[in-house]
Image: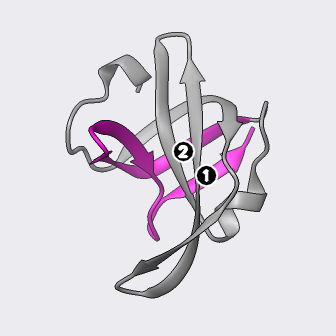
Amino acid sequence: MKIEEITGEMNDVSLEGEIVSISSPTQVRTKFGTKQVANATIKDETGEIGLSLWEDQINAVSQGDRVRISGGYVKSFKGKLQVAVGRRGKIEVI
C-alpha cells in the first residue's frame, strides 16, 4: 500500500517507507498503564504520514531508516491521520 492510498480508520495496513523524523519520547497514560510514545513521520514516493512508535519500537528505528510495517492500523490524532503498529503488527528495518 502507498501512503496516498491511506484513508480514515483502516486496519491491517502494510507499507514501506523512510523514517523522516522522530520526536523525543513522552510518557502518556493509557488503559494499559503509563507508556512511552514518540511521534515519527514516514514517507514514500506518494507522500508522508505520521507514525506512532510505542515503547520498544522507539529505539528499534532511526531517522533515515527504510522500514516495512505490516499489520498496522490508521487512526486520527489531533485531526491528522497516523499509522500505528499494534500488538499484532510488526515494524522492521529493511
Q: Is residue 30 above or below residue 57?
A: below
Specify how the rendered protein is coloured: one colour
Q: Amino acid at mark 1?
A: Ile
Magenta segment range?
Answer: 66-94
Residue at 60%, 42% in the rendered image: 40
User: Of label 1 and label 2, which has the lower sequence position?
Assistant: 2
**Helix, strand or loop for the magenta stretch, by majority:** strand
Task: Point out the image quarter for the C terminus.
Answer: top right
Residue at 79%, 30% in the rendered image: 64
Q: Which label belongs to residue 91?
A: 1
Q: Badge 2: few (under 14), some or many (20 or more) residues near its Cα, within 10 Å?
A: many
Q: Is residue 49 above or below residue 93?
A: above
- Residue most toward the bottom? 33
Give the residue pinned by disc 2: 69
Question: Helix or strand or loop: what does disc 1 sit on?
Answer: strand
Percent coordinates x, y for residue 74 in the rendering: 32, 45
Percent coordinates x, y for residue 56 in the rendering: 69, 69
Q: Badge 1: few (under 14), some or many (20 or more) residues near its Cα, within 10 Å?
A: many
Q: CA distance from mark 1 to mark 2?
A: 5 Å
Q: Is residue 85 magenta?
A: yes
Left or right: residue 37 versus residue 49 is right
The reply to whether residue 2 is in sight is no
